Amino acid sequence: MRTKAAVIIATVATLIGLADGAHVLAQRRTPPKDPKSIALFNWLWYMGMLRGVQEIDAVATLELKATGTIGVGGQPCTLTNYRVSVNYQTPGMRVQYTCTTADGQSRKGIEVVSGQFAWDEDVVGAGLVPGRGTATPNQGALTDRLIRLWSSPQGAPKAAVAGGENTKVTTEGGKTVVTFPIPGVPGAEAKATLNGSNQAERVETRLGNAVTEFTYEKYADYNPPDDKVEGFYAGHIVEKRDRATIRDLTVTETEVGNLYVVVPVPENVRNRSSR
């Protein structure tokens, strides 16, 4: 009797779910028709960022691990650990790395940006609890970190949508090109060139005479084998500033399942930066 009752309950629940789904589907938003909206929609769609029958951008956070090299102290440093944690809704990013330079020196760092504040940590969450770690203000790195955040494979389409009327879509050499302002960096403009799969293959960001170029390739779902959600990310990332390579990364794993990621600003950073 218990088994039969469970089957009946499950069946009713399924029918109710189908009915609700049909109701919502009937209210699905009208697909975009103008070229700009179509381009932005396709960019988000082919990144796997649009979810549900309403097709809204449902990617709120990102966790990423990678190998490769980064520039530290003006020289390349081979990574032994590299992890990026991002919150897009309350914009913030924490980059943790350990690497070795050509002369065998080990380097490590934790670089953080949140809103209009940038700082470095000696331990994750430094300065949030009295006596635990040191958060060192680094406002000089604010612009570079915001550009990196909003020129990234997921950050760029979000920034383009947020740009509203200031975002423009054109065609160059048969490819879709999207230009948009970088949030939080007055005067910075990004130019994203999309590939045939409607994913950014190149993002060039200019601020005055400074040019930061990001190239992206090998898009795939890099989530763990037991958590594939067709949330795509670039597998190879190269960042150059004024033609000098800053980062050359091979992505090994991502988590786009909206993990809990927060980047609160320590009081000493907030107070120091507001002076």
Image: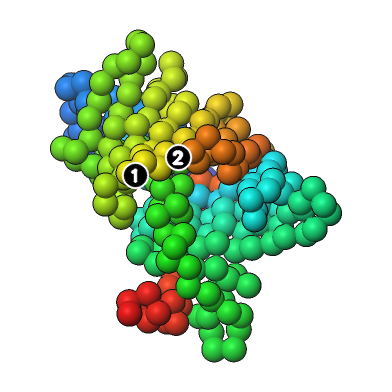
**Position of residue 207 in the picture relative to residue 200 (left or right):** left
User: Relative to 97, does residue 201 appear above or below in the rendering?
Assistant: above
- The foreground one among 224 and 252 is 252
> Viewed as shown, does residue 217 lie left or right of 149?
right
**Is 6 rendered above or below residue 32?**
below
Q: Is residue 8 visible?
A: no
For badge 2, the amino acid type reads: Thr
Q: Find disc 1 in the rendering and name its residue.
A: 207
Where residue 128 appears, as percent x and y from the top left, is 50, 80
Image spot of residue 79 (x, y percent): 72, 49
Give the residue at mark 2: 212
Q: Residue at x 40, y 23 (%)?
A: 194
Toward which corner of the image does residue 220 lie, by quadrant? top right
Instruction: Give amino acid for label 1.
Output: Leu
Q: Residue at x 74, y 47 (%)?
A: 78
The first of marks 1 and 2 along the sequence is: 1
Tell me the quarter of the picture where residue 195 sits.
top left
Specify the farthest residue to the top: 174
Cα distance between the residues tagged 1 and 2? 9 Å
Asked whether disc 1 touches disc 2, contact meaning CB atoms under 8 Å apart, the reply is yes
- Residue 38 in percent (x, y) is at 25, 24
**From the viewer's perspective, is residue 97 above or below residue 250?**
below
Quadrant into which the C terminus falls: bottom left
Image mark for residue 55:
none
Identify the element where label 2 is drawn: strand
Q: Position of residue 254 (x, y in %)?
A: 59, 44
**Residue occupying the far bottom of the picture:** 130
In the displayed orientation, state which residue is furthest to the front. 209
Say what secondary structure mark 1 lies in: strand
Side of 81 where 118 appears, left or right = left
Q: Nearer the viewer, residue 117 or 81?
A: 117
